[in-house]
Image: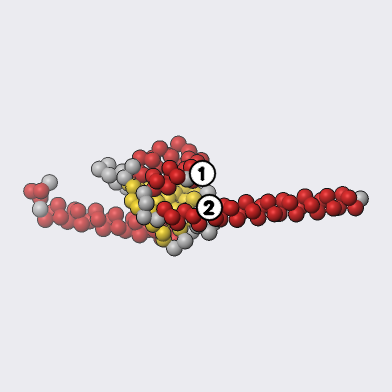
Amino acid sequence: MALRSIFGLCVTLFLTCSAFLLEAQESASVSSLKQYIGQMPSELLKQEPKIQERLQKLLGKDYERLQERFAHGVPIEMFGDVLILRGEKPFTPGNPKVIVGIGLFTNKIHCALVESAGRNIFSEDPKKIPNEFNRFIIISDKRSQEEGEKKKKAEAENPEKK
């Protein structure tokens, strides 16, 4: 009976330590993603195949849309504690965009595929999408709207340049 108790304690201790080490290892790898700030999203995906695999799993058949939009990527940036990867499909009606956020403290990936008709949000943890990610999407939407209005105004002022 005592041997069973000792064995059970050892198994519990082993599982607890293993979970702690795995979490620490994941945390270290997520914080190392900061090294990609200023680089293009394609570089991160090439160097971090696990992130790419997670995005493929998260988006399923929509992963191809992400790849199309990352063809014209924007340098990676930090917004709060979320690493932001962006891209767009230029010269396409509606100017489709992608915004991917990786929570550096949560290690969760969130993705928005944005089009003129709206956006699709994908998340590894839909109930805990970081406020920074949501704010970034809103700011990005406002920028796009302002750019569109400026373009329309410029076209209206100079109709011969069409």
Residue sitting nearer the eye, 155 or 88: 88
Q: Is residue 115 left or right of residue 61?
A: left
Q: Position of residue 108 (x, y in %)?
A: 52, 52
* Residue found 43% across the figure and 42% down from its top: 46
* Residue found 40% across the figure and 56% down from its top: 37
* Quadrant hosting residue 96: top left
Q: Pointer 2: residues within 10 angstroms few (<14), some, or many (20+)?
A: some
| Residue type of the residue flagged with mark 2 | Ser
**Which of disc 2 and disc 1 is earlier in sequence?**
2
The residue furthest left is 160
Report, in whole angstroms, how far the alpha carbon at label 1 lies from the one at label 2: 11 Å
The local secondary structure at tag 1 comes to: helix
Residue sitting nearer the eye, 146 or 57: 57
The reply to whether residue 17 is in sight is yes
Q: Position of residue 36 (x, y in %)?
A: 41, 53
Q: Position of residue 57 (x, y in %)?
A: 51, 40
The local secondary structure at tag 2 comes to: helix
Look at discs 1 and 2 and give the one toward the viewer.
Answer: 2
Q: Is residue 104 left or right of residue 162?
A: right
Numbered circle sitting on residue 29: 2
| Residue type of the residue flagged with mark 1 | Lys
- The answer to whether the residues at label 1 and label 2 have Cβ atoms under 8 Å apart is yes
Q: Position of residue 77 (x, y in %)?
A: 39, 57
Residue at mark 1: 50
The reply to whether residue 129 is in sight is no
Q: Is residue 118 left or right of residue 57?
A: left
* Residue found 33% across the figure and 51% down from its top: 74
Q: Is residue 130 left or right of residue 154?
A: right
* Residue found 85% across the figure and 53% down from its top: 6
Residue sitting nearer the eye, 15 or 122: 15
Q: Pointer 1: residues within 10 angstroms few (<14), some, or many (20+)?
A: few
